[in-house]
Image: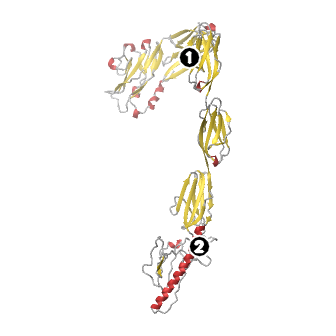
Amino acid sequence: MWCLELLLPLLLIINDASCQWNVWIPRDISAMTNSCVVIPCTFMYPSGIRPYRGTHGIWYYGQPYPQLFPPVVFKSRTDVVHESYKGRTKLLGDLHQRNCTLLINNIGTEHSGRYYFRADLGGANMYTFPDFSELKVLDQPNIDVPEEIISDESLELTCYAPDNCPDMNPEIQWMYTDYLPDPEFSSDYLEESNTAVLSNTLTFTPRPMHNGQLLGCRVYYPNTTLVYERLISLDVKYAPRSVWVNVSSEVMEGSSVVLHCEVDSNPPPRISWMFGEQELQWDTAFNMSLPLDDVSPAQEGVYTCVGDNGYGTMNTSLYLAVKYPPREPLVNDSMTVLEGTTLALHCSTQGSPAPTLTWLKDGELVGTITADELSVLEIAEITPHGDGQYRCLAENEHGRASSSLNITVEYGPVLLEESKCTVVREGVQCVCMATGNPEPTIEFYLPDLNITINETDGRFNFYTHTDGHTSTGMIKLREKGERAENGGPAVNVHCSISNMYGRESVLLELQQEKKYMMAVIVGTIGGVAVIAFIIAAVRYVGQNNKKENGNPRQDLVLENPALYYSAVKKDKQNLRKKVLKTELLGSKFNSILEETTGEDGDYQPVGPVAGLERQELNYAALEFIGARSREGASGRGDDGSNYTEIKAK
């Protein structure tokens, strides 16, 4: 017996915020005469409505329109109901909880029909729901009998009894089964939409002798006088003597074929063509043909001709083979794997005859050729070269088809040989190139300064570029104060490459560019010559001025120019960028005084910065004694460089 409390959770499932007038009742429900039935019911109304003077309801019979005065089955406000329902109905549900479940006692066949519920919330808030529950009142149980009962084949007969009365539980018995060979009985309880049915199944194997025999099903309610019975007569069929069909044949996809069957029996049999468990065609005759047009591979299989003359059946089968080109192969989905992974790529298809399967990678043969509907390509410890498109090609004498997948191989970062540092006009340029999947992240590390430079560091000229799985990082550094043994700038730059599979750090080698080195050498020699020429010119002008002014000759003392490094540059009082402009012999000399060298080729700091640590080179300042300053001599050159200034003391 089902439980009425199962209805209550239905109220919690519905969202009040969006509910409208709605009702849930079983569409079909049944009961035996003189018993009772419970019609489960739950209703909803718009959330904005507040019941006026309580929640009430009415059950109608036959149709839902109150203005047509349908019979009232139950009414919560009064006891006024149709005379055929007086004393028979009772509301089991609580209308305030939106439960409108109805009980009808002592029902008869005249109570079969449709039942409607109407909600009454007071005022204008009354609504008759269009959904109905159709009640079937039975005076005998139902027996499920197969359309055909065939000799020597297992037979199942099922008897059903409704169980929708809370106080009365039915029981089922089979009658006249003593003469059956090895009968078996099994009971089952079915619940659907809060209605219940009790069933009992009789299973046995009939013989020709059982044709015309009676079987009965009895339903009764214990502790009552209610008993219901139903009898049936067995109609057992006998097999014909022979059945003839075509021999097995082959047909091309899209063509037509005719299957023919002849049955030798008396009286004339019912002939049916079966495809598996599906009956395709039947007729009552001695022979029948089954035409099949536009044949597809789905129609390949066993076809059976079954002859039934009313006394039994006999059948004969044939196999129809359908030839067709390969279908589009099914392969693995595209995948991303880690270097070193072992893969198994599957390719399966269908074709008749069995197709030849070939594996291609980027257009080149990589897999063995097999004549089957399944091919497996194994890749042991895949490398980055295994990255690409894999295609499975299926071929037979009727056509070909193929499918592809992509394999992406992920691997740790690998430094490329293009990674190096070179001398450029601005100083030193370091390039770091690496490949990997995912593409590597590049960082530069300067051990001398104990800093790491990446895209987030705005103090340096840092540039990155990604092309596929290759990443390129570049940084430009101003020339440092120290020199390597070959006379070039000393560079100590480490490149760090990393992705989710690893990290590697290497020291980038400095490679001098020949053209630039020649320019540095020529520029250095030319710079020394220009400085010497300027010093000689200044001395010459000073001596002439001294003679013209009648001053006694004094020796011009020239101090060694001081070299300032980047650390000294931060001191605004000691570091001033000075500009030199001198006109000599009608010509203008504009030059940048960048550096001077000592005898050993190293930078020689003098003056107040002699004790400072050598750092990035800054511009130097020259001061002369006894020379006169020239108005407008300081300033900037055309290229934005700072010139030194010559002053007389």
**Residue 616 horizontal/vertical position (percent):** 55, 70
- Please name the residue shown 50% across and 78% down the image: 621
Instruction: Tell me if mark 2 has few (under 14), some (14-19) or many (20+) residues whose alpha carbon lies within 10 angstroms of its own.
Output: few
Which badge, 1 or 2, comes first in the chain's sequence?
1
Disc on res. 510: none
Gap in Å between the C-alphas at discs 1 and 2?
103 Å
Q: Is residue 79 left or right of residue 641?
A: left
Amino acid under disc 1: Gln
Residue 153 occupies which quadrant of the picture?
A: top right
**Residue 536 horizontal/vertical position (percent):** 52, 84
Instruction: Tell me if mark 1 has few (under 14), some (14-19) or many (20+) residues whose alpha carbon lies within 10 angstroms of its own.
Output: some
Residue 525 occupies which quadrant of the picture?
A: bottom right
How many numbered callouts? 2
Nearest to the observer: residue 38 or residue 188: 188
- The residue pinned by badge 2 equals 521
Nearest to the observer: residue 266 or residue 247: 247
**Residue 474 horizontal/vertical position (percent):** 56, 60
Nearest to the observer: residue 569 or residue 93: 569
Q: Is residue 611 visible?
A: no
Nearest to the observer: residue 568 or residue 172: 568
Q: Is residue 118 visible?
A: yes
Residue 66 occupies which quadrant of the picture?
A: top left
- The residue pinned by badge 1 equals 281
**Residue 186 horizontal/vertical position (percent):** 59, 17
In this rendering, the answer to whether 37 lies above or below 582 is above
